[in-house]
Image: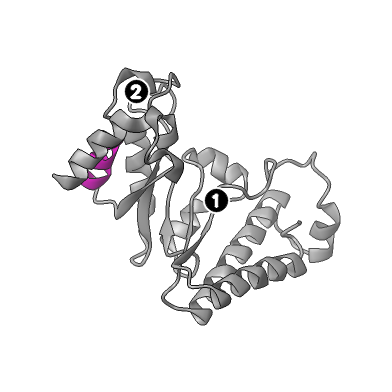
Amino acid sequence: MNPGYSQVRDYIVNGIKEVVQKYDVDGVQFDDYFYPFNVNSADVTLDKAAYQQSGSTLSIGAWRTQNINSLVAAVYKMVKETKPNVVFGISPQGNIANDLNAGADVYTWCSKPGYIDYICPQIYWTYDHPTAPFETLAKKWKSLVTADHVKIYIGLALYKAGTNSSGWEKADNIIARQIQTARSLDCDGFMLYSWAYLDHPQTAKEMANVKKLLNG
């Protein structure tokens, strides 16, 4: 579906509204998928007609990003009007450059009212990752959140614990350390992906250390 059309944005908003109205949900969360290509690419022409019909004077990249912002703001407004106690958040990629390339305007969402209740960046790497070290990214994301009402929860890659993936084999207390880092930065909490690994042989040692920390 092309978010460049208002009808598409309305369709998505109304679909979420049905869930919020009919079910006792605590919140609505978007994952990290927005435009499936770099929004600044002029080579992608599948939304050319929508761009021309909009009459926008923005660049194609800025227009695409605006489409996502319009959708996010519309979902937030609908949720608050439908059930004010329900929260709306987004869990974008931990790599901010990738987010911006996908039209996910995380800078705006984290700094201005009317978009989200919380952000949950997926910082799915270890402390010594060569290009995306955990603590560096956690500090960067924390600094983005300047709007008073926006909370930040750090998304942690529990599913990688106990594997031989990019440094996760070096220790069995990485998740516990990352929780401690989030606390030291005064983040509002954390989320573990995914629930299937809360009680799984692969993550047993990591979860034992997490439980020890949380129960301490």
The majority secondary structure of the magenta stretch comes to helix
Decide which of 158, 13 is in the foreground and name it: 158
The residue lying at 32 percent from left, 42 percent from top is 139
Does residue 10 lie above or below 123 as drawn?
below
Q: Residues within 10 Å of mark 1 (few under 14, many from 20)?
A: few
Q: Is residue 120 left or right of residue 207?
A: right
| Element assignment for label 2 | loop
Is residue 5 shown to the viewer in this render? Answer: yes
Question: x%, y% of residue 141?
Answer: 38, 46
Q: Is residue 118 left or right of residue 8?
A: left
Does residue 213 lie above or below 80 as drawn?
above
Is residue 133 shown to the viewer in this render? Answer: no
Question: x%, y% of residue 166?
Answer: 43, 21
Q: Is residue 12 left or right of residue 210?
A: right
Query: Which numbered tag is attached to residue 186?
Result: none
Question: Magenta residues, as a range?
Answer: 175-184
Q: Quadrant of residue 113?
A: bottom left
Query: Which numbered tag is attached to residue 128?
Result: 2
Residue type for callout 2: Asp
Q: Quadrant of residue 171?
A: top left
Is 112 one of the magenta-colored residues? no
List the residue tagged with mark 1: 31
Q: Is residue 43 left or right of residue 176?
A: right
Which quadrant is home to the N terminus?
bottom right
| Element assignment for label 1 | loop
Residue type for callout 1: Asp
